[in-house]
Amino acid sequence: MRFTTKPLTNQTWPDLEAIFDARGCSVARGCWCMFYRRSGAAGVPSAYGERAQQSRKDLRALAEGGAQVGLIGYRDGVPVGWVSFGPREDFAKLRRSPVLKPVDDEPVWSIVCFVVPSEHRGQGVAKALLAAAVAYCRKKRVRLLEAYPVDKAHRAHDQDMWFGAKSMFDAAGFEEVARRKPERPIVRIRPTAS
């Protein structure tokens, strides 16, 4: 099978909707990857509430405006996953988080979320999306890429793995630079050096 990616744009928006509407992605439908782009109230809203619909509109507006918001992954042309990332300053909630606040003053891009429908999990989709995000950042000459994976001794529930597993980032060459909460490290890689 051939794995490819495309940035989220107005043209690829229907592919993102197909991923978010798939089984196992109800949390994504509640947040539309806007949770970390906003500051304020915690908690992901219902997939059918007013706040979720506003988040959907806001993400689409970012995509239509040409903002870097993420990549859609395809297997043989079928949309199978999503990775949300971009300049850290685009994620207001990261600035205010006591756990995920900036480590230093270096300019950095952040990977904040992976969305993989149930039927495509356990097949290396998130790993392929991570490699594509690093390659994209290398091409854009991003000097530092950061992520906030989950690091648990036991297998975590799928709904807890939107950030990806630390082991996946370790295998991709990321290094831990901070840990303010036992299960939530901050990891980094210099894409131009990988």
Image (spheres, rainbow, N blue to C red):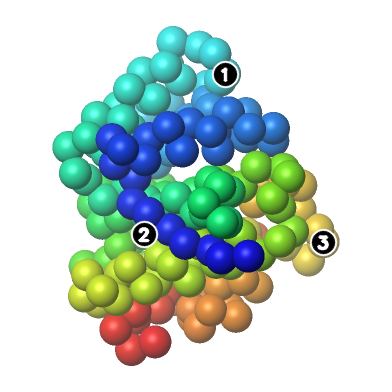
Residue beneath the point at 36% across and 40% down: 12
Disc 3 from disc 1: Cα separation: 28 Å
User: Which numbered disc flags the more N-terminal residue, 2 or 1?
Assistant: 1
Quadrant where the N terminus is found in the figure:
bottom right
Q: Where is residue 41 in the image (x, y as percent from the top left)?
A: 42, 26
Seen in the picture, residue 41 relative to 129 is either above or below; the reply is above
Q: Is residue 113 visible?
A: no
Secondary element type, mark 2:
strand
Q: Which of 85 and 139 is in front in this view?
A: 139
Q: What residue type is labelled 3?
A: His
Residue 24 in percent (x, y) is at 69, 35
In this rendered view, identify the residue nearer to me: 186 or 158.
158
Q: Which residue is drawn at 62% across and 28% down?
A: 26
Return the residue found at the far top.
50
- The residue singled out by tag 3 in the image is 154
Residue identifier under label 2? 110
Can residue 3 be seen in the rendering of this structure? Answer: yes
First in sequence, mark 2 or 3: give its number.
2
Q: Nearer the viewer, residue 94 or 170?
A: 170
Q: In which quarter of the image is residue 189?
A: bottom left
For mark 1, what is the residue? 46
At mark 3, the secondary structure is loop
Q: Position of residue 170 (x, y in %)?
A: 58, 78
